């Protein structure tokens, strides 16, 4: 699905290929953003999905459906979203730092999402001068990613109807109500780290998407998340094992099962490539006059996604004059800086930078992260790598960066999941 990567050759070219490539509209102004999801089936199931013997039964000849039943051990979905460096300087999701981090995160069991900010790669639009639009781009993808991750869950016969697995109904309304919150890593490199710093709390992002007008961009983002989740469920499920769980589904299937699944996937993936065209509210609300307030039926169904256990990773964070220039010397948020940085104090976080980083203002980064570390009482870890600059292009520098990323994820997130 992905073309060859043409960025730095200093890192190994053995990068994972994206599982899905698609577009979503930005909630800022509907600009189409090119996005990727990297995952393997084991990622979604946490490596803990396994067949088990049939439950005790008096039936001497258990049905095929009973034989197909699965027990799913408790697990915590792992997800990560990473933002790239400045678009004006050529940053995009093919950046060697982003691809290297993706590889490490996938290897430790994370479903990883990356996206091109406006004006980067295949994303439409132009980069802004004050970063307000880019921050909304990031918020858009976090909302999408959380609803996507929420829609992909290890199914157990009886959890939700199998006769509509090719549609969106199971994804939109039939998900288990007691699923655990995900472990989510939010991060970025350079400019992407700056945007991560200004991100609102994930609970605030989810609140924006939980209830939205049917004609809104938020509703379209949720629909696309549900669509991709449906495709992922088709990819993951062992249909040979569970096909007999629903006679109605079997009776509706035409032609070979493989052909049917492929046709549905093509249809869904095509919808994820299409541009979003906002409908005029006057036509979406029959009988209403312009200016009328929306009613309950004008909103999409409310789907509560549990707030994740959020962790943050900032690579080569921009501070000082460069950060001020990137935001047009304006504040990205009305929230005070002290409150803004609370998420790094109260959540597990990691700040990695090079000792010789002349772009990110090392002195300011040291002062800032020192204050965060002291206040976080160990929740925030600061890692300064000697002899390394901003770009991480040298092979040894990149290796040190990725090694620290891997160790941090395995240590802190793994420890959190074992509690």
Image (cartoon, rainbow, N blue to C red):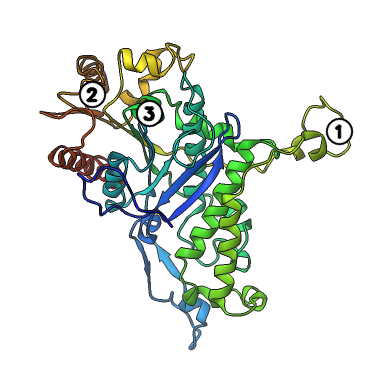
Report the residue marked by disc 1.
288
Tag shown at residue 160: none
| 181 horizontally vs 222: left or right | left
In this rendered view, identify the residue nearer to me: 412 or 26: 26
Callout 1–callout 3 Cβ contact below 8 Å: no
Q: Nearer the viewer, mark 1 or mark 3?
A: 3
Element marked by disc 3: loop
Residue pictured at 49% horizontal, 13% vertical: 334
In the displayed structure image, the side of residue 148 where residue 47 appears, left or right = left
Report the side of 365 relative to 186 (left or right).
left
How much space separates mark 3 and mark 2, taking CA atoms?
Answer: 32 Å
Q: Residue furthest front?
A: 6
Q: How many marks?
A: 3
Between 15 and 232, the residue placed more toward the observer is: 15
Question: Which quarter of the picture shows residue 310?
Answer: top left
Query: Residue 24 placed where, x, y %?
Result: 55, 42
What number is the disc on residue 86? Answer: 3
The mark nearer the N terminus, 3 or 2, is 3
Q: Residue at x 48, y 41 (%)?
A: 306
- Asked if the residues shown at circle 2 and circle 1 are in contact, with their CB atoms under 8 angstroms apart, the answer is no
Residue that carries the numbered disc 2 in the rendered image: 377
Coordinates of residue 321 in the picture (x, y in percent): 32, 12
């Amino acid at each position: 699905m992905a073309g060859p990567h043409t960025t730095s050759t200093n890192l190994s070219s053995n990068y994972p290929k994206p599982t899905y490539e698609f577009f979503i509209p930005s909630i800022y102004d509907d600009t189409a953003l090119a996005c990727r999801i990297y995952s393997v089936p084991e990622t979604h199931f946490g490596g803990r999905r396994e067949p088990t013997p049939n439950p005790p039964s008096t039936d001497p000849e258990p049905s095929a459906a009973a034989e197909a039943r699965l027990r799913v051990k408790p697990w915590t979905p792992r997800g990560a979203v990473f933002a790239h460096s400045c678009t004006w300087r050529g940053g995009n999701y093919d950046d060697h730092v982003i691809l290297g981090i993706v590889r490490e995160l996938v290897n430790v069991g994370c479903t990883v999402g990356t996206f091109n900010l406006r004006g980067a790669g295949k994303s439409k639009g132009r980069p802004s001068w004050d970063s307000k639009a880019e921050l909304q781009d990031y918020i858009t993808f976090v909302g999408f990613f959380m609803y996507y991750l929420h829609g992909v869950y290890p199914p157990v016969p009886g959890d939700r109807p199998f006769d509509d697995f090719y549609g969106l109904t199971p994804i939109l309304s039939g998900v288990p109500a007691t699923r655990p919150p995900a472990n989510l890593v939010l991060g970025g490199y350079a400019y992407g780290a700056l945007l991560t710093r200004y991100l609102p709390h994930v609970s605030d992002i989810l609140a924006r998407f939980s209830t939205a007008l049917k004609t809104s961009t938020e509703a379209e983002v949720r629909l696309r998340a549900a669509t991709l989740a449906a495709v992922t469920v088709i990819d993951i499920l062992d249909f040979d094992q569970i096909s007999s769980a629903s006679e109605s589904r079997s009776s509706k299937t035409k032609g070979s099962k493989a052909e049917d699944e492929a046709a549905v996937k093509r249809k869904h993936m095509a919808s994820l490539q299409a541009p979003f065209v906002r409908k005029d509210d006057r036509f979406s609300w029959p009988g209403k006059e312009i200016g009328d307030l929306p009613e309950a039926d004008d909103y999409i169904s409310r789907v509560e996604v549990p707030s994740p256990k959020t962790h943050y990773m900032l690579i080569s964070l921009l501070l000082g004059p460069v950060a001020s220039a990137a935001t047009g010397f304006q504040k990205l948020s009305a929230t005070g800086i002290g409150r803004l940085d609370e998420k790094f104090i109260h959540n597990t976080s990691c700040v990695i930078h090079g000792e010789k980083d002349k772009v990110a203002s090392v002195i300011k980064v040291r002062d800032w992260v020192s204050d965060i570390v002291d206040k976080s009482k160990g929740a925030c870890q600061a890692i300064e790598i000697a002899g390394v600059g901003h770009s991480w292009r040298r092979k040894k520098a990149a290796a040190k960066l990725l090694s620290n990323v891997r160790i941090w994820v395995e240590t802190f997130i793994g420890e959190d999941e074992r509690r």
